[in-house]
Image (tube, grey):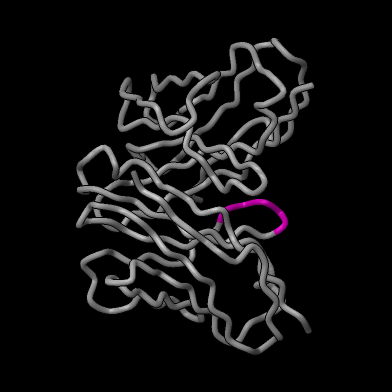
Amino acid sequence: EAQVTQNPRYLITVTGKKLTVTCSQNMNHEYMSWYRQDPGLGLRQIYYSMNVEVTDKGDVPEGYKVSRKEKRNFPLILESPSPNQTSLYFCASHLGGANYEQYFGPGTRLTVT
Amino acid sequence: AQKITQTQPGMFVQEKEAVTLDCTYDTSDQSYGLFWYKQPSSGEMIFLIYQGSYDEQNATEGRYSLNFQKARKSANLVISASQLGDSAMYFCAMRAGPYSGAGSYQLTFGKGTKLSVIP
């Protein structure tokens, strides 16, 4: 089954404790992205990747890091989480080209206390 | 910069009636794509429909159709024969720029419209 998986689905952590949210896709997609969703703001892109070892900032990259060492994986790293990073996070991938559909993971609900 | 505006924070519709969710966009690019996603209370993002800026016909997918008015920069979603399972948040999104350009990797989302279907 074609899918994007994220782990963990739910995470409660404390300020300053480094964490990683994993994302993996099995569709051989070149393009992957991370979004955060906050009430009243819709989804905003954090980082995206066009291929292995190629990443770039989205609209809200501050406080986040990403890496793309393998095509299928695109982890999101919070080196020192803060309460304003409490949010719902989505990983997405797509094939690219004109008419692409972004496939979204199930989401990771992160709470930073 | 691209911008998506959804002016209806919430809407109600009677079951079996049709409903239109509004979306206007702003971009200076000639090539762009418009998407609608559904997010039920369970949280996942479900792709509904896509319209390319050069597509001459309005996109349709089952009960969903996209009313694309290029001159007005609007891309409204029409849901026909509403069902209780249509109750959800709906997001309009845009990809702008050439397909091979940096903009093609980014979706800009609106703030969403919460649709409630009344039995």
Specify whether A2 is left or right of A105. left
Residue B12: where, in percent of width, then height? 70, 76
Query: In the rendered image, which quarter is residue A86 located in?
Result: top right
Residue B31: where, in percent of width, then height? 21, 56
Span highlighted in magenta in the image = B41-45
Specify whether B94 is left or right of A105. left
Which corner quadrant holds the C terminus of chain B? bottom right
Specify whether B49 is left or right of A75. left
Residue B28: where, in percent of width, then height? 25, 52
Q: Is residue B20 above or below residue B45?
A: below
The secondary structure that most of the magenta stretch takes on is: loop
Identity of the residue drawn at 78% across and 25% down:
A12
Q: Is residue B33 above or below residue A95?
A: below
Identity of the residue drawn at 46% across and 66% down:
B23
Identity of the residue drawn at 71% across and 77% down:
B117
Q: Is residue A25 above or below residue A112?
A: below
Residue B43 in magenta?
Answer: yes
| Residue B32 vs residue A5, the one in the foreground | B32
Identity of the residue drawn at 33% across and 71% down:
B72
Query: In the rendered image, which quarter is residue B100 located in?
Result: top left
| Residue B117 vs residue B61, the one in the foreground | B117
How many numbered circles does the render carry? 0
Residue A50: where, in percent of width, then height? 31, 32
